[in-house]
Image (tube, rainbow, N blue to C red):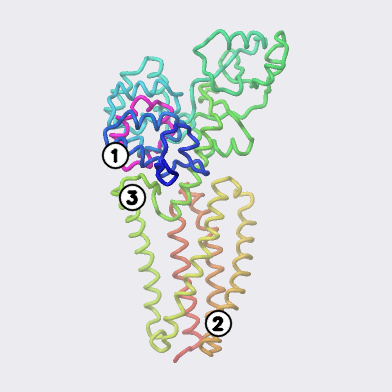
Amino acid sequence: MSELELPEVETDTQPENQLDRDDHLRPEFVRAVLDAVEDGDDEAARTLVEPLHPADIADLFELTPQQDRAALARAVTDLLDGDVFAEMNDYVREDLIDALEPHQVADLASELDTDDAVAIIEDMDEDEQRAVLRALDPDDRAAIEEALSYAEESAGRLMQRELIAVPEHWTVGDAIDYLRGHEELTTDFWEIFVVDPAHKPIGTCQLSWMLRTPRGIAIADVMKREQTLIPVDMDQEEVALRFQKYALISAAVVDHGGRLVGMITVDDIVHIISEEAGEDTLRLAGAGDGDINEPIRLTVRTRFIWLVVNLGTAMVASSVVGLFQGTIASFALLAVLMPIVSGMGGNAGTQTLAVVVRALATNQLTSSNTARMIGREFRIAAANGVMLGALIGLGTYVIFRNTDLSLVIAAAMLVNNITAGLGGVLVPVTLDKFRIDPAVSSAVFVTTMTDTMGFFSFLGLASLWGLHG
């Protein structure tokens, strides 16, 4: 067969032939798998999918149209283990979970660490949850039920119960023998937690230290006593900030009595940081979850609500314009130029808002430096306002040859930029003080302020200046 006659997708099952340079599944590979499923050739589909990493199998299901996922799942059912479901997008996972029997979900959950099992079960209907929990082993059921008792997005939901804890009176040799002699212990850990008789963590010992320390040395002599403890009810965003601030690999989670109940590892935190960053960005835009796998009906409802809110704020701004109908009627050029002032103010406000919301989310902005932040943004807004005002004033004069109009629009640009800068700081800071998520509500208030002040400053100054055609 000549080179031109070679098929697009070879049946070679090496993973590198199925991924592009960016580690994304090749479109032709996805098409080949779906064609095999459509032709009823489950064996061919399984042969193509088998070499993939669990994360890539999860990606394959996310790239598959919703109506074809069930058929794909049937074709590669023995490859759909707990690791694949743990890597899967929430909406895609829910679709597949709904198609499984409770005992099948229980089998998947039993393969996973507690935190990953909870991620699979927590979004199920209450009746389905009970059916799955009944199908689990008693120990697994107790651990998952305890996790589900904690608030969503808390450390209690995020943590895994599988950890290694040893008493402080043990030697290094005792700990090593314990690890080697109990096959049921978790295999995914970086450090051992040392606890007192009340099971309260008093220190940690990294595996590297243990391997390089003589067996007869006491654990208490080599452990690190300083540690970052995570309260079980701490929000996952705050947990992520602690990992980031203190460069943690893992951390102990303690209950209200200070007893060790679980641990959180950095691989979970990577997901949280990505999730929270994207969530704040989408909330600023009022776009909901922003997930391309989200049901259309839910996306429409979320976006429509925010668009209605924006419609209300637009009506407030338009009412300001209505106050100056006479001024606009006497000088029609004002109607041409006033959107520039409000639009530039909106852009400036969005820039400031994005910086402040991020600073609040990462604890860079606190009560200790809020006043300095306000002063900083005021100076930035004033400088930009002066430069933009001069630029738009010069441009207006070049086009319309009207000095008064140029001065009015330059002054309005300065006023609205300062409004945008101050609003971009004060609105999210104030909302944060009242325990309202600034990422959700700030944009509406800031946009209303810049639109209203943009129209009011430009038309008001034009009226006071006595501009007329």
Q: Is residue 205 visible?
A: no
Name which residue type carries label 2.
Answer: Gly
Tell which circle, 3 or 2, labels the residue nearer the N-terminal end: 3
Identify the secondary structure beneath mark 3.
helix
What is the crowding at mark 3: few (fewer than 14 residues within 10 Å), some, or many (at least 20)? some
- Callout 1 amino acid: Asp
**Residue 342 seen in the figure:** yes
Residue 102, horizontal then vertical, whole percent: 29, 24
Query: Label 2, on which residue?
Result: 395
Residue 86 part of the magenta segment: yes
Question: Are the residues flagged by discs 3 and 2 in contact, CB closer than 8 Å?
Answer: no
Residue carrying label 3: 299
| Percent of width and height locating residue 414 | 57, 73
**Pointer 1 and pointer 2: residues touching (CB < 8 Å)?**
no
Q: Is residue 289 left or right of residue 100?
A: right
Residue found 35% across the figure and 24% down from its top = 78
* Residue visible at 43% across and 88% down in the picture: 331
The residues bearing labels 3 and 2 have C-alpha atoms spaced at a distance of: 42 Å
Helix, strand or loop status at disc 1 = helix
Q: Which residues are magenta?
A: 62-91
Dominant secondary structure, magenta: helix
Q: Which mark is residue 405?
A: none
Q: Tell me the mark number nearer the camera, choosing from 3 and 1.
A: 1
Residue 16 percent across, percent down from the top left: 50, 36
**Quadrant in which residue 411 is drawn:** bottom right
* 348 shown above or below 436: below
User: Along the line of sight, which residue is nearer the eye, 446 or 402?
Assistant: 402
Q: Which residue is mark 1?
A: 68
